[in-house]
Image (cartoon, rainbow, N blue to C red):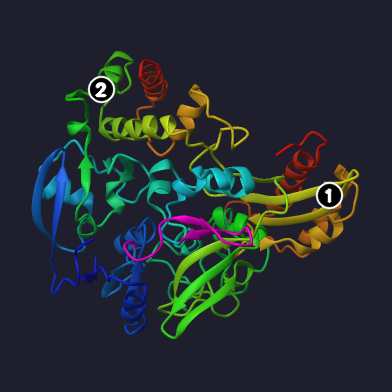
Amino acid sequence: MALTESAGETGTIAVRVDGVSRRLTVDPRRTLLDLLRDQLDSYSVKKGCDHGQCGACTVLVGGRRVLACLVLAVTCDGADVTTAAGLTTEGEPHPLREAFLDSDAYQCGYCTPGQICSAAGLLTEFRDGSPSHVTSPVASTPQWTEAEIAERMSGNLCRCGAYDGIVAAIHRTGEGG
Amino acid sequence: MRPFTFASPSTPADAVRAVADDPSAVFLGGGTNLVDHLKLGIARPARVIDITGVTPTGLREDADGALVIGAGVRNSELAADHRVLERYPVLAEALLSGASPQLRNMATVGGNPLQRTRCVYFQDVTTPCNKRSPGSGCSALGGYTRHHAILGASEQCAATHPSDMAVALSILEAQVRVLGPSGERIVPFGELHRLPGDHPERDTVLEHGELITEISLPAPWTRRSAYRKVRDRASYAFALVSVAAAVSMLEGKISDIRVAFGGVAHKPWRALRAEEVLRGARPDDDLFRSAAEAELFEARPLEGLDGGNAFKIPLATRTLAAVLRELTAAEGER
Protein backbone atom coordinates (compact mmCIF):
# COMPACT_ATOMS: atom_id res chain seq x y z
CA MET A 1 0.00 0.00 0.00
CA ALA A 2 2.40 2.64 -1.19
CA LEU A 3 -0.47 4.91 -2.07
CA THR A 4 -0.65 7.98 0.09
CA GLU A 5 -3.02 10.93 0.03
CA SER A 6 -4.59 11.19 -3.40
CA ALA A 7 -4.57 14.89 -4.04
CA GLY A 8 -7.67 15.22 -6.14
CA GLU A 9 -10.28 12.98 -7.65
CA THR A 10 -7.98 10.20 -8.73
CA GLY A 11 -5.36 7.76 -7.49
CA THR A 12 -2.64 5.89 -9.32
CA ILE A 13 -2.28 2.16 -8.82
CA ALA A 14 -0.09 -0.62 -10.18
CA VAL A 15 -2.11 -3.79 -10.62
CA ARG A 16 -1.51 -7.15 -12.30
CA VAL A 17 -4.51 -8.67 -14.07
CA ASP A 18 -4.29 -12.20 -15.53
CA GLY A 19 -0.52 -11.92 -15.67
CA VAL A 20 -0.35 -8.47 -17.27
CA SER A 21 0.99 -5.60 -15.15
CA ARG A 22 -0.54 -2.19 -15.59
CA ARG A 23 -0.28 1.25 -14.12
CA LEU A 24 -3.59 3.05 -14.01
CA THR A 25 -5.25 6.20 -12.82
CA VAL A 26 -8.57 5.52 -11.14
CA ASP A 27 -11.40 7.50 -9.62
CA PRO A 28 -11.57 6.53 -5.90
CA ARG A 29 -15.25 5.65 -6.39
CA ARG A 30 -14.52 3.02 -9.04
CA THR A 31 -14.89 -0.60 -7.97
CA LEU A 32 -12.50 -3.34 -9.06
CA LEU A 33 -15.42 -4.79 -11.03
CA ASP A 34 -15.92 -1.61 -13.04
CA LEU A 35 -12.16 -1.20 -13.46
CA LEU A 36 -11.90 -4.69 -14.95
CA ARG A 37 -14.85 -4.37 -17.29
CA ASP A 38 -14.83 -0.70 -18.26
CA GLN A 39 -11.15 0.20 -18.12
CA LEU A 40 -9.43 -3.11 -18.88
CA ASP A 41 -12.00 -4.81 -21.18
CA SER A 42 -11.96 -7.90 -18.99
CA TYR A 43 -15.48 -9.00 -19.81
CA SER A 44 -15.41 -12.50 -18.33
CA VAL A 45 -16.06 -10.76 -15.00
CA LYS A 46 -19.81 -10.23 -14.71
CA LYS A 47 -21.90 -7.63 -12.95
CA GLY A 48 -24.94 -9.28 -11.39
CA CYS A 49 -26.39 -7.54 -8.36
CA ASP A 50 -23.47 -5.12 -7.77
CA HIS A 51 -24.20 -5.40 -4.02
CA GLY A 52 -22.25 -8.46 -2.92
CA GLN A 53 -25.20 -10.82 -2.97
CA CYS A 54 -24.85 -12.93 -6.13
CA GLY A 55 -21.18 -13.82 -6.63
CA ALA A 56 -21.14 -13.16 -10.41
CA CYS A 57 -18.18 -10.79 -10.03
CA THR A 58 -16.00 -13.26 -8.09
CA VAL A 59 -12.30 -12.96 -8.94
CA LEU A 60 -9.14 -14.12 -7.20
CA VAL A 61 -6.97 -11.46 -5.57
CA GLY A 62 -3.68 -12.91 -4.41
CA GLY A 63 -5.26 -16.34 -4.94
CA ARG A 64 -8.21 -15.65 -2.61
CA ARG A 65 -11.75 -15.38 -3.91
CA VAL A 66 -13.36 -11.98 -3.36
CA LEU A 67 -16.28 -9.97 -4.74
CA ALA A 68 -14.94 -7.38 -7.20
CA CYS A 69 -18.09 -5.26 -6.80
CA LEU A 70 -17.24 -4.49 -3.15
CA VAL A 71 -13.56 -3.69 -3.66
CA LEU A 72 -12.54 -0.12 -4.41
CA ALA A 73 -10.02 -0.23 -7.26
CA VAL A 74 -7.91 2.40 -5.56
CA THR A 75 -7.18 -0.12 -2.77
CA CYS A 76 -5.74 -2.59 -5.29
CA ASP A 77 -2.28 -1.07 -5.57
CA GLY A 78 0.13 -4.00 -5.83
CA ALA A 79 -2.68 -6.56 -6.19
CA ASP A 80 -2.48 -9.68 -8.35
CA VAL A 81 -5.93 -10.27 -9.85
CA THR A 82 -7.02 -13.41 -11.68
CA THR A 83 -10.29 -13.61 -13.60
CA ALA A 84 -11.91 -16.73 -15.05
CA ALA A 85 -10.41 -15.84 -18.45
CA GLY A 86 -6.90 -15.90 -17.01
CA LEU A 87 -7.34 -18.89 -14.74
CA THR A 88 -4.67 -21.49 -15.51
CA THR A 89 -2.65 -24.14 -13.71
CA GLU A 90 0.94 -24.51 -14.91
CA GLY A 91 0.15 -22.66 -18.12
CA GLU A 92 -2.78 -24.91 -19.08
CA PRO A 93 -6.44 -23.89 -18.81
CA HIS A 94 -7.67 -24.71 -15.32
CA PRO A 95 -9.31 -28.19 -15.16
CA LEU A 96 -12.43 -26.59 -13.70
CA ARG A 97 -13.19 -25.09 -17.11
CA GLU A 98 -13.31 -28.51 -18.80
CA ALA A 99 -15.20 -30.00 -15.85
CA PHE A 100 -17.92 -27.33 -16.11
CA LEU A 101 -18.36 -28.24 -19.80
CA ASP A 102 -18.42 -31.99 -19.15
CA SER A 103 -20.82 -31.73 -16.21
CA ASP A 104 -23.27 -29.42 -17.99
CA ALA A 105 -22.68 -26.97 -15.14
CA TYR A 106 -24.36 -23.95 -16.74
CA GLN A 107 -27.29 -22.95 -18.86
CA CYS A 108 -27.17 -19.28 -19.83
CA GLY A 109 -23.56 -18.99 -18.64
CA TYR A 110 -23.76 -15.56 -17.07
CA CYS A 111 -22.80 -16.70 -13.57
CA THR A 112 -20.24 -19.23 -14.84
CA PRO A 113 -17.01 -17.15 -14.71
CA GLY A 114 -17.81 -16.20 -11.11
CA GLN A 115 -18.67 -19.81 -10.30
CA ILE A 116 -15.35 -21.00 -11.75
CA CYS A 117 -13.27 -18.41 -9.88
CA SER A 118 -15.16 -19.21 -6.70
CA ALA A 119 -14.58 -22.94 -7.22
CA ALA A 120 -10.85 -22.32 -7.75
CA GLY A 121 -10.75 -20.45 -4.44
CA LEU A 122 -12.72 -23.28 -2.82
CA LEU A 123 -10.18 -25.89 -3.98
CA THR A 124 -7.33 -23.91 -2.42
CA GLU A 125 -9.23 -23.36 0.83
CA PHE A 126 -10.12 -27.04 1.04
CA ARG A 127 -6.50 -28.10 0.42
CA ASP A 128 -5.47 -25.77 3.24
CA GLY A 129 -7.89 -27.58 5.56
CA SER A 130 -10.20 -24.60 6.11
CA PRO A 131 -13.49 -25.66 7.72
CA SER A 132 -17.00 -24.69 6.61
CA HIS A 133 -20.38 -24.34 8.29
CA VAL A 134 -21.13 -28.02 7.59
CA THR A 135 -17.79 -29.37 8.85
CA SER A 136 -18.74 -31.27 12.01
CA PRO A 137 -17.19 -31.07 14.48
CA VAL A 138 -15.82 -27.78 13.27
CA ALA A 139 -12.24 -28.65 14.30
CA SER A 140 -12.21 -31.92 12.32
CA THR A 141 -10.68 -32.40 8.87
CA PRO A 142 -13.27 -31.46 6.23
CA GLN A 143 -14.41 -34.35 4.00
CA TRP A 144 -14.73 -33.94 0.23
CA THR A 145 -18.51 -34.30 0.02
CA GLU A 146 -21.23 -32.68 -2.06
CA ALA A 147 -22.61 -31.08 1.12
CA GLU A 148 -19.25 -29.39 1.75
CA ILE A 149 -19.07 -28.17 -1.85
CA ALA A 150 -22.65 -26.85 -1.84
CA GLU A 151 -22.05 -24.93 1.40
CA ARG A 152 -18.77 -23.50 0.14
CA MET A 153 -20.43 -22.37 -3.11
CA SER A 154 -23.42 -20.72 -1.41
CA GLY A 155 -22.09 -17.27 -2.29
CA ASN A 156 -22.63 -17.90 -6.01
CA LEU A 157 -26.20 -17.82 -7.27
CA CYS A 158 -27.33 -19.46 -10.51
CA ARG A 159 -30.76 -18.34 -11.63
CA CYS A 160 -30.89 -21.14 -14.22
CA GLY A 161 -30.53 -23.62 -11.37
CA ALA A 162 -27.51 -25.54 -12.67
CA TYR A 163 -26.41 -26.31 -9.14
CA ASP A 164 -26.30 -30.11 -9.53
CA GLY A 165 -23.91 -29.79 -12.46
CA ILE A 166 -21.82 -27.15 -10.69
CA VAL A 167 -21.39 -29.32 -7.59
CA ALA A 168 -20.58 -32.35 -9.80
CA ALA A 169 -17.97 -30.39 -11.80
CA ILE A 170 -16.21 -29.22 -8.68
CA HIS A 171 -16.45 -32.65 -7.04
CA ARG A 172 -14.71 -34.42 -9.93
CA THR A 173 -12.09 -31.68 -10.27
CA GLY A 174 -11.21 -31.96 -6.59
CA GLU A 175 -10.93 -35.74 -6.81
CA GLY A 176 -8.63 -35.43 -9.82
CA GLY A 177 -6.43 -32.88 -8.07
CA MET B 1 -21.91 8.00 -5.52
CA ARG B 2 -20.80 11.22 -3.93
CA PRO B 3 -17.15 12.07 -4.75
CA PHE B 4 -14.62 11.46 -1.98
CA THR B 5 -10.89 11.63 -1.54
CA PHE B 6 -8.96 8.55 -0.55
CA ALA B 7 -5.92 8.08 1.64
CA SER B 8 -3.85 5.18 2.98
CA PRO B 9 -2.14 6.47 6.12
CA SER B 10 1.05 4.78 7.28
CA THR B 11 0.31 4.53 11.02
CA PRO B 12 -2.82 3.81 13.10
CA ALA B 13 -2.42 7.20 14.81
CA ASP B 14 -2.41 8.98 11.43
CA ALA B 15 -5.56 7.10 10.45
CA VAL B 16 -7.29 8.04 13.69
CA ARG B 17 -6.30 11.69 13.35
CA ALA B 18 -7.49 11.82 9.74
CA VAL B 19 -10.98 10.63 10.71
CA ALA B 20 -11.25 12.33 14.11
CA ASP B 21 -10.41 15.73 12.57
CA ASP B 22 -13.02 15.43 9.83
CA PRO B 23 -16.70 14.69 10.57
CA SER B 24 -17.16 13.62 6.94
CA ALA B 25 -14.37 11.02 7.01
CA VAL B 26 -14.77 7.26 7.49
CA PHE B 27 -12.50 4.25 7.98
CA LEU B 28 -12.43 1.62 5.23
CA GLY B 29 -11.61 -1.95 6.28
CA GLY B 30 -12.73 -4.96 4.27
CA GLY B 31 -15.33 -2.76 2.57
CA THR B 32 -18.07 -5.39 2.44
CA ASN B 33 -20.58 -3.14 4.17
CA LEU B 34 -19.19 0.35 3.53
CA VAL B 35 -18.73 0.02 -0.24
CA ASP B 36 -22.31 -1.20 -0.52
CA HIS B 37 -23.45 1.78 1.56
CA LEU B 38 -21.53 4.17 -0.69
CA LYS B 39 -23.49 2.79 -3.64
CA LEU B 40 -26.82 2.88 -1.81
CA GLY B 41 -26.29 6.44 -0.58
CA ILE B 42 -26.46 5.38 3.08
CA ALA B 43 -22.85 6.47 3.64
CA ARG B 44 -21.86 9.77 2.05
CA PRO B 45 -18.31 10.48 3.25
CA ALA B 46 -16.12 13.18 1.71
CA ARG B 47 -13.00 11.30 2.72
CA VAL B 48 -12.26 7.56 2.93
CA ILE B 49 -9.34 6.42 5.06
CA ASP B 50 -8.03 2.94 4.25
CA ILE B 51 -6.95 1.18 7.45
CA THR B 52 -6.08 -2.23 6.00
CA GLY B 53 -2.40 -1.29 5.96
CA VAL B 54 -2.27 -0.08 9.58
CA THR B 55 -4.37 -2.50 11.65
CA PRO B 56 -2.63 -5.68 12.91
CA THR B 57 -3.22 -8.70 10.66
CA GLY B 58 -2.05 -11.52 12.93
CA LEU B 59 -2.98 -13.41 16.09
CA ARG B 60 -0.83 -13.69 19.20
CA GLU B 61 -1.11 -15.23 22.64
CA ASP B 62 -0.36 -13.08 25.65
CA ALA B 63 1.11 -14.17 28.98
CA ASP B 64 -2.21 -14.96 30.69
CA GLY B 65 -3.41 -17.21 27.91
CA ALA B 66 -5.55 -14.70 26.04
CA LEU B 67 -5.72 -14.90 22.26
CA VAL B 68 -5.24 -11.43 20.80
CA ILE B 69 -6.69 -10.96 17.32
CA GLY B 70 -5.56 -8.12 15.09
CA ALA B 71 -8.42 -6.00 13.77
CA GLY B 72 -7.18 -6.55 10.22
CA VAL B 73 -7.44 -10.35 10.39
CA ARG B 74 -9.97 -11.55 7.84
CA ASN B 75 -13.02 -13.47 9.06
CA SER B 76 -12.02 -16.60 7.07
CA GLU B 77 -8.50 -16.58 8.56
CA LEU B 78 -9.87 -16.35 12.08
CA ALA B 79 -12.36 -19.19 11.50
CA ALA B 80 -9.57 -21.46 10.20
CA ASP B 81 -7.06 -20.68 12.96
CA HIS B 82 -6.34 -23.89 14.90
CA ARG B 83 -6.35 -22.08 18.26
CA VAL B 84 -9.84 -20.72 17.57
CA LEU B 85 -11.09 -24.10 16.33
CA GLU B 86 -9.77 -25.95 19.35
CA ARG B 87 -10.35 -23.45 22.17
CA TYR B 88 -13.28 -21.32 21.00
CA PRO B 89 -15.41 -23.50 18.66
CA VAL B 90 -18.37 -21.14 19.20
CA LEU B 91 -16.42 -18.38 17.46
CA ALA B 92 -15.38 -20.50 14.49
CA GLU B 93 -18.96 -21.77 14.09
CA ALA B 94 -20.39 -18.25 14.29
CA LEU B 95 -17.94 -16.92 11.71
CA LEU B 96 -18.58 -19.81 9.32
CA SER B 97 -22.35 -19.35 9.55
CA GLY B 98 -22.07 -15.73 8.40
CA ALA B 99 -22.10 -14.33 4.86
CA SER B 100 -20.35 -16.26 2.05
CA PRO B 101 -16.77 -17.50 1.57
CA GLN B 102 -15.91 -14.49 -0.62
CA LEU B 103 -17.25 -12.04 1.95
CA ARG B 104 -15.48 -13.83 4.80
CA ASN B 105 -12.23 -13.54 2.83
CA MET B 106 -12.74 -9.77 2.72
CA ALA B 107 -14.43 -8.84 5.99
CA THR B 108 -12.16 -7.93 8.90
CA VAL B 109 -12.42 -8.76 12.59
CA GLY B 110 -12.51 -5.07 13.50
CA GLY B 111 -15.17 -4.28 10.94
CA ASN B 112 -17.49 -7.22 11.53
CA PRO B 113 -18.92 -5.97 14.87
CA LEU B 114 -19.35 -2.51 13.35
CA GLN B 115 -21.39 -3.62 10.35
CA ARG B 116 -24.79 -1.99 10.27
CA THR B 117 -28.25 -3.48 10.39
CA ARG B 118 -29.73 -5.12 7.30
CA CYS B 119 -33.18 -3.69 8.13
CA VAL B 120 -34.71 -3.26 4.68
CA TYR B 121 -35.93 0.23 5.55
CA PHE B 122 -32.51 1.33 6.79
CA GLN B 123 -31.07 0.16 3.47
CA ASP B 124 -33.69 1.92 1.34
CA VAL B 125 -32.97 5.65 1.31
CA THR B 126 -36.46 6.40 -0.04
CA THR B 127 -38.14 5.32 3.20
CA PRO B 128 -38.15 7.02 6.63
CA CYS B 129 -35.63 5.55 9.08
CA ASN B 130 -34.53 7.00 12.41
CA LYS B 131 -31.24 5.14 12.29
CA ARG B 132 -30.26 6.48 8.87
CA SER B 133 -31.99 9.83 9.12
CA PRO B 134 -32.75 10.72 12.77
CA GLY B 135 -36.24 12.07 13.36
CA SER B 136 -37.66 10.80 10.07
CA GLY B 137 -39.65 7.93 11.65
CA CYS B 138 -39.50 4.15 11.66
CA SER B 139 -40.91 2.33 8.65
CA ALA B 140 -40.54 -1.08 10.27
CA LEU B 141 -43.27 -0.39 12.83
CA GLY B 142 -46.31 -1.72 11.00
CA GLY B 143 -44.11 -2.80 8.10
CA TYR B 144 -42.18 -6.01 7.47
CA THR B 145 -40.84 -7.20 10.80
CA ARG B 146 -39.65 -10.75 10.23
CA HIS B 147 -36.02 -9.75 10.78
CA HIS B 148 -36.66 -7.25 13.55
CA ALA B 149 -36.13 -7.15 17.28
CA ILE B 150 -38.25 -8.68 20.04
CA LEU B 151 -36.03 -7.45 22.88
CA GLY B 152 -34.72 -4.00 23.77
CA ALA B 153 -36.29 -2.11 20.88
CA SER B 154 -37.58 1.47 21.24
CA GLU B 155 -40.34 3.52 19.65
CA GLN B 156 -37.59 4.86 17.40
CA CYS B 157 -36.02 1.65 16.11
CA ALA B 158 -36.55 -2.11 16.08
CA ALA B 159 -33.52 -3.05 13.98
CA THR B 160 -31.43 -6.13 14.77
CA HIS B 161 -27.66 -6.42 14.76
CA PRO B 162 -26.64 -8.67 11.86
CA SER B 163 -23.28 -10.05 13.04
CA ASP B 164 -22.91 -13.70 14.02
CA MET B 165 -19.33 -13.21 15.21
CA ALA B 166 -20.49 -10.56 17.67
CA VAL B 167 -22.87 -13.00 19.40
CA ALA B 168 -19.97 -15.40 20.00
CA LEU B 169 -17.69 -12.59 21.18
CA SER B 170 -20.30 -11.50 23.72
CA ILE B 171 -20.23 -14.88 25.52
CA LEU B 172 -16.46 -15.12 25.22
CA GLU B 173 -16.33 -11.81 27.11
CA ALA B 174 -13.87 -10.38 24.61
CA GLN B 175 -12.05 -7.11 25.21
CA VAL B 176 -11.91 -4.53 22.44
CA ARG B 177 -8.79 -2.36 22.17
CA VAL B 178 -9.69 1.01 20.75
CA LEU B 179 -7.36 3.78 19.59
CA GLY B 180 -8.73 7.31 19.70
CA PRO B 181 -7.31 10.81 19.23
CA SER B 182 -6.43 11.00 22.94
CA GLY B 183 -5.02 7.51 23.33
CA GLU B 184 -6.08 3.91 23.87
CA ARG B 185 -8.91 2.42 25.88
CA ILE B 186 -10.35 -1.05 26.42
CA VAL B 187 -14.07 -1.61 25.88
CA PRO B 188 -15.58 -4.85 27.23
CA PHE B 189 -17.33 -6.44 24.25
CA GLY B 190 -20.63 -6.53 26.13
CA GLU B 191 -20.53 -2.74 26.39
CA LEU B 192 -19.58 -2.04 22.78
CA HIS B 193 -23.07 -2.10 21.28
CA ARG B 194 -26.00 0.11 22.36
CA LEU B 195 -29.72 -0.37 22.50
CA PRO B 196 -31.49 2.07 20.17
CA GLY B 197 -33.30 4.22 22.77
CA ASP B 198 -33.71 7.75 21.46
CA HIS B 199 -30.50 7.59 19.41
CA PRO B 200 -30.77 4.63 17.04
CA GLU B 201 -28.26 6.35 14.75
CA ARG B 202 -25.58 5.28 17.22
CA ASP B 203 -24.90 1.55 17.02
CA THR B 204 -21.97 1.50 19.44
CA VAL B 205 -20.30 3.51 22.19
CA LEU B 206 -17.35 4.35 19.92
CA GLU B 207 -16.79 8.03 19.18
CA HIS B 208 -16.15 9.30 15.66
CA GLY B 209 -12.48 8.64 14.91
CA GLU B 210 -12.05 5.78 17.36
CA LEU B 211 -10.51 2.72 15.72
CA ILE B 212 -10.68 -0.91 16.86
CA THR B 213 -7.10 -2.23 16.71
CA GLU B 214 -7.37 -5.60 18.49
CA ILE B 215 -9.94 -7.93 20.00
CA SER B 216 -8.73 -10.13 22.81
CA LEU B 217 -10.29 -13.42 23.96
CA PRO B 218 -9.66 -14.38 27.60
CA ALA B 219 -8.14 -17.84 28.14
CA PRO B 220 -10.88 -20.44 27.58
CA TRP B 221 -12.55 -21.93 30.66
CA THR B 222 -14.33 -24.63 28.65
CA ARG B 223 -14.19 -26.24 25.23
CA ARG B 224 -17.88 -27.01 25.26
CA SER B 225 -19.19 -24.13 23.22
CA ALA B 226 -21.36 -23.89 20.13
CA TYR B 227 -23.23 -21.51 17.84
CA ARG B 228 -26.52 -22.39 16.19
CA LYS B 229 -28.17 -20.17 13.62
CA VAL B 230 -31.74 -20.47 12.34
CA ARG B 231 -32.46 -18.73 9.06
CA ASP B 232 -34.72 -18.78 6.00
CA ARG B 233 -32.11 -20.63 3.88
CA ALA B 234 -29.56 -23.28 4.81
CA SER B 235 -26.71 -20.90 3.98
CA TYR B 236 -25.91 -17.27 3.15
CA ALA B 237 -28.75 -15.61 5.05
CA PHE B 238 -29.00 -13.51 8.19
CA ALA B 239 -30.22 -15.07 11.41
CA LEU B 240 -33.86 -15.07 12.39
CA VAL B 241 -32.62 -16.34 15.74
CA SER B 242 -29.23 -17.61 16.82
CA VAL B 243 -27.78 -18.93 20.05
CA ALA B 244 -24.20 -18.91 21.28
CA ALA B 245 -23.46 -20.90 24.40
CA ALA B 246 -20.50 -22.14 26.44
CA VAL B 247 -20.92 -24.68 29.22
CA SER B 248 -18.86 -26.52 31.78
CA MET B 249 -20.21 -29.58 33.62
CA LEU B 250 -19.44 -31.01 37.05
CA GLU B 251 -21.04 -34.16 38.47
CA GLY B 252 -23.94 -34.01 36.05
CA LYS B 253 -24.71 -30.37 36.73
CA ILE B 254 -24.01 -27.21 34.81
CA SER B 255 -21.12 -25.67 36.74
CA ASP B 256 -20.81 -22.57 34.60
CA ILE B 257 -22.50 -21.14 31.53
CA ARG B 258 -22.66 -18.23 29.12
CA VAL B 259 -25.53 -17.71 26.70
CA ALA B 260 -26.37 -15.05 24.12
CA PHE B 261 -29.03 -14.66 21.46
CA GLY B 262 -28.55 -13.15 18.00
CA GLY B 263 -31.23 -11.88 15.62
CA VAL B 264 -33.48 -10.68 18.42
CA ALA B 265 -32.15 -7.24 19.39
CA HIS B 266 -30.21 -4.13 18.40
CA LYS B 267 -27.12 -5.82 19.85
CA PRO B 268 -25.94 -9.32 20.70
CA TRP B 269 -28.29 -10.23 23.56
CA ARG B 270 -26.36 -11.69 26.48
CA ALA B 271 -28.90 -13.81 28.37
CA LEU B 272 -27.82 -13.24 31.98
CA ARG B 273 -31.19 -14.24 33.41
CA ALA B 274 -31.16 -17.52 31.52
CA GLU B 275 -27.62 -18.16 32.75
CA GLU B 276 -28.75 -17.63 36.32
CA VAL B 277 -31.47 -20.27 35.95
CA LEU B 278 -29.05 -22.75 34.36
CA ARG B 279 -26.00 -22.32 36.60
CA GLY B 280 -25.72 -25.15 39.13
CA ALA B 281 -28.74 -27.02 37.77
CA ARG B 282 -29.10 -30.50 36.35
CA PRO B 283 -29.77 -30.17 32.62
CA ASP B 284 -33.07 -31.30 31.12
CA ASP B 285 -35.63 -29.93 28.70
CA ASP B 286 -37.77 -28.38 31.45
CA LEU B 287 -34.77 -26.47 32.74
CA PHE B 288 -33.88 -25.23 29.27
CA ARG B 289 -37.45 -24.02 28.77
CA SER B 290 -37.46 -22.23 32.12
CA ALA B 291 -34.16 -20.56 31.24
CA ALA B 292 -35.53 -19.31 27.92
CA GLU B 293 -38.69 -18.05 29.64
CA ALA B 294 -36.64 -16.18 32.24
CA GLU B 295 -34.94 -14.30 29.43
CA LEU B 296 -37.83 -13.89 26.99
CA PHE B 297 -40.66 -13.00 29.37
CA GLU B 298 -40.23 -9.34 28.49
CA ALA B 299 -40.01 -9.89 24.75
CA ARG B 300 -42.24 -7.48 22.84
CA PRO B 301 -42.88 -8.94 19.41
CA LEU B 302 -43.98 -6.64 16.60
CA GLU B 303 -47.03 -6.95 14.45
CA GLY B 304 -46.30 -6.59 10.80
CA LEU B 305 -47.41 -6.87 7.20
CA ASP B 306 -45.72 -10.26 7.08
CA GLY B 307 -47.48 -11.65 10.14
CA GLY B 308 -45.13 -10.13 12.68
CA ASN B 309 -42.22 -11.64 14.54
CA ALA B 310 -43.83 -13.32 17.57
CA PHE B 311 -42.56 -16.61 16.10
CA LYS B 312 -39.12 -15.66 17.40
CA ILE B 313 -40.11 -16.40 21.00
CA PRO B 314 -40.80 -20.14 20.54
CA LEU B 315 -37.99 -20.30 17.98
CA ALA B 316 -35.46 -18.84 20.43
CA THR B 317 -36.77 -21.15 23.17
CA ARG B 318 -36.34 -24.26 21.05
CA THR B 319 -32.99 -23.18 19.63
CA LEU B 320 -31.60 -22.58 23.11
CA ALA B 321 -32.81 -26.03 24.19
CA ALA B 322 -31.26 -27.68 21.13
CA VAL B 323 -27.87 -26.09 21.78
CA LEU B 324 -27.88 -26.86 25.51
CA ARG B 325 -29.03 -30.44 24.99
CA GLU B 326 -26.01 -31.00 22.75
CA LEU B 327 -23.51 -29.15 24.94
CA THR B 328 -24.56 -30.77 28.21
CA ALA B 329 -24.77 -34.33 26.85
CA ALA B 330 -22.51 -36.72 28.77
CA GLU B 331 -20.44 -37.60 25.74
CA GLY B 332 -20.22 -33.97 24.64
CA GLU B 333 -16.46 -33.91 24.20
CA ARG B 334 -16.24 -30.64 22.36
Residue at the image point whose x is 29% and y is 13% from the top: A102
Q: Nearer the viewer, residue B197 or B49?
A: B49
Q: Tell me if I can see residue B28 in this picture.
A: yes
Quadrant of the snapshot with the C terminus of chain A = top left
Q: Looking at the picture, how far across and down is residue B225, in whole percent?
A: 69, 47
In the rendered view, does B112 fall on the left or right side of B7? Answer: right
Q: Is residue A159 above or below residue B109?
A: above
Q: Amino acid at mark 1?
A: Arg
Q: Is residue B78 above or below residue B114?
A: above
Circle 2 Cα neighbour tier, 10 Å, few/some/many (<14 / 14–19 / ≥20): many
Residue at the image point whose x is 47% and y is 37% from the top: A130
Q: Tell me if I can see residue B119 in this picture.
A: no
Q: Is residue B61 magenta?
A: yes
Q: Amino acid at mark 2?
A: Arg
Residue under label 1, please give it. B289
Circle 1 Cα neighbour tier, 10 Å, few/some/many (<14 / 14–19 / ≥20): some
Q: Are marks 2 and 1 on the same chain?
A: no
What range of the chain is rendered magenta?
Answer: B52-70
Do the numbered discs 2 and 1 sit on residues whose CB atoms are within 8 Å?
no
Q: Determine whether the residue tagged by mark 1 lies in a helix, strand or loop.
A: helix
Q: Looking at the picture, how far across and down is residue B49, in whole percent?
A: 30, 70
Q: Nearer the viewer, residue B271 or B249?
A: B249
Q: Looking at the picture, how far across and down is residue A66, in whole percent?
A: 33, 45
Q: Looking at the picture, how far across and down is residue B219, in whole percent?
A: 65, 57
Q: Which mark identifies residue A97? A: 2
- What main secondary structure does the magenta stretch of the protein show? loop
Q: Quadrant of residue B152?
A: bottom right
Q: Is residue B318 magenta?
A: no
**Nearer the camera: disc 2 or disc 1:** 2
